[in-house]
Structures are given as C-alpha cells and as structure tokens.
Image: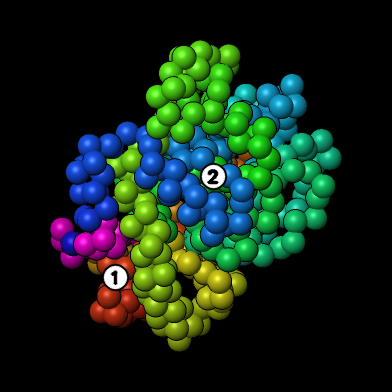
Amino acid sequence: MLDNKIRVGGVMLTPLEAAFVSHAIDRGMIGPGGLTKSFERELAAVHGYKHCLCLNSGQSALMIALQALRLQNGRSLNVAVPAITYISSLAAVVQSQNTPVLVDVHREVHAEMDYDQMPEDVDIVMPVHLFGAAVKRNYPFKNISVEDACEACYAPGVGFGPILCTSFYSSHTITTGMGGAIMCNDDDLYFKCWQLVNHGRIKHDDYTDAANLKDRFTFDEIGYSLKYADINAALGLAQHYNRDNIIEARQYIGLLLTQKLQELGFEQDKHVMPIEDNTYMMFPILLDQGMDRDRIVDVLNQNNIETRMLMPITTQPVVKRLFGPDVEDRYPNAKFLNKHGFYIGCHPMMSDESVDHIAAVIKEAIQ
Ligand SMILES: Cc1ncc(COP(=O)(O)O)c(C=O)c1O
C-alpha cells in the first residue's frame, strides 16, 4: 500500500501474473492473439456459455451486446435499467442507440431492480449484479435479458440468461488493468459482437491466420476498434487461475466486516449484504433513516477509510438532462438509497486490523 488509507479497491498480484506477462513479452505477442483466445475459453467454460468475446471494457461489452441486438432486431429497443447502478449500464444503452427506461429498485442494500415496476413496452431487461453478488429474485419475464455482471464476475447465480457482460477494470473481482467480456450462446450474436469490436470486419478471424488477410481488411459494418490484447489476457489468465484465492480473501474480509457490524446492530439483507454466494467486490452499507450518512462518511474519510456513494443514477446531471429535473422523485426507493447508502472496500489487501479500525470508527460515528 502507498499509504495507510483503507482504499475501496485493492488488487492481489502474485508471481503467477508476473510469469504470464513475461511469457507474453518473451513470445513477442502482446496484441490480440492466442492468450486472448485462451482467456475467453476459460471464462466461457466457468460461466457456462459457448462463446466469450473479450474487449476493452465492461461498458463497451454492454454497449456492443445491446448494439448487436438492435441490429438483429432492425430497430431501437427499450432497455430497462435499474435506478441504482454504475453510469455505464445506462450509458451503454444510449450509446448503442437504444432507449433507456429506468426502473426503481427494492429498498434494500443490494438494490435489486423491482420487477413489479417494469413498464409494459420494455424489450430488454438489464439485471445488474451489484457489489459482487448475483441478484436473487427469479427473472419473471419472457423478454431477453442482458446481465451486467461487471461487479460480479464468477459470482454464483450470474449468467442465468442468454447474454452476460463483465468487467476486468482495476479493483474488480479479477482485473487485467482494464477490459471486459461478453458471453453468449448464439452464434450470430457472437459474430455480430465480434464484428462490431473489430472494425466491422466481414469474416471472423482469430488473429493468428495469415491466410485470411484479405477478409481482415474487408468491412461490411461500421464497427469500432475495441479489441483486447494478449498482454492483458496474460494478466487475466493468471488472475483467473488465482480466482479462488482472490475470492476467498475477499470473502474473509467480508465475513469479518459483517460480524463486526452485526455486533453494532446492522442486519444482513437490510443494512449489509448477505454472506452467501457473495464474492465481495466491495462492502455496501445502507443506514437507517435516522442516521446521518454524510456525517458518518466524513468521519470514515477523516479516519483514512475511503468511501463511495451507493451507485446513484438519478442525481447525476446527465441523467437529469435525459429524464427531467424531477427524475430522483420518480424513483423513491433509489432516492432513499442515494441518501442513506455508501460503500467501503472489501479486498485482498485489507487486514484484520483494517476491519477492526473500520468497526471502531463506525461505532464511534453512529453514536
Ligand atoms: C455495474 C457496472 N457496470 C458497468 C461497469 C463498466 O465497467 P468498465 O469500467 O470496465 O467499463 C462498471 C464499472 O465499474 C460497473 O460497476
């Protein structure tokens, strides 16, 4: 650690990551290639999908999947997004030239989308698996889902639907510095996504086949350049093989924090996340109405404990421009979470002492 701050994110890097990266360098292959393919195969296998496409970020993964669906359907689609999530979930809908529809969440720390609030004219639903855990409610619709698992790679329960997107940005469950992935079973959808990520190329190409050079430079879609690189995949493969250690370390800290906060009266589900099936990308806390969240967060920050707000969407200036200045009032449960929620770190670089320190500071702050 650079200082004694307890940060919201921390990465476990071992000699395995160093070995894989130097292997990529020794081969002289750091762009898209065989390591990317191997990483994709591993991710598809553990998440139970036929295809996986790695690309430059989680936001791009969502945007490309949604754009491919728009092209397949030949029209712009209404996409339901929970009113608590990271801005990328919403931005991806707008950038893919689909129409975002905000849906309120349950008034609970996990902020799951309230499926009972779903408008009729929705085409696609985007369940967002926040904070390291899959949403628990059964998906009740026939509508296709595009799951945002950017905060919950590997979490048990993610990947119940046809399309799963995730992120490997710094401090995420596993990280490759930056990066993301789309997983699906549909061959045509996979190809459309691949094509959009690769400049609109006419034919699928695994980057290693020199015989395909003509097709590589023939384009029949206006695509992007959002490719992934073997230097990142080298990190990714090592992080993937280390995933059990990384997740166990996160779960250890998550369990300790839960125990300490339960001693202070915080309850699982209501104030802190349930421990079952949680990979703990971070540790969200939802305070009761009477508690002054801003003061508590100030005290934490003054005591070297970093905090972030609980993924507010409806307070964002750009969201007010898109949905109207009163948008926050139209999603009352999200508004409650905007006012009473925050999160702290939960990662392998934290120690028993950091948990004791956090618990002591929260105890003092809530008195
Ligand atoms: C819920 C959610 N969706 C999407 C993203 C976007 O991922 P990336 O930063 O890789 O673009 C994030 C990033 O933190 C996220 O938390």
| Label 1 CB less than 8 angstroms from ligand 1 | no
Disc 1 marks which amino acid?
A: Met
Q: 19 or 80: nearer the eye?
A: 19
Position of 151 relative to 28 (above/below): below
Q: Residues within 10 Å of mark 2 (few under 14, many from 20)?
A: many
Mark 1 or mark 2, which has the lower sequence index? 2
Residue at 46% x, 41% y is 54
Q: 340 or 37: nearer the eye?
A: 37
| Membership of 16 in magenta stretch | yes
| Membership of 302 in magenta stretch | no
Q: 209 or 329: nearer the eye?
A: 209
The region drawn magenta spans: 2-17
Q: Which residue is mark 1?
A: 350
Q: Which residue is mark 2?
A: 52
Position of 127 relative to 94 (above/below): below
Residue 297 picture location, percent across and down: 37, 61
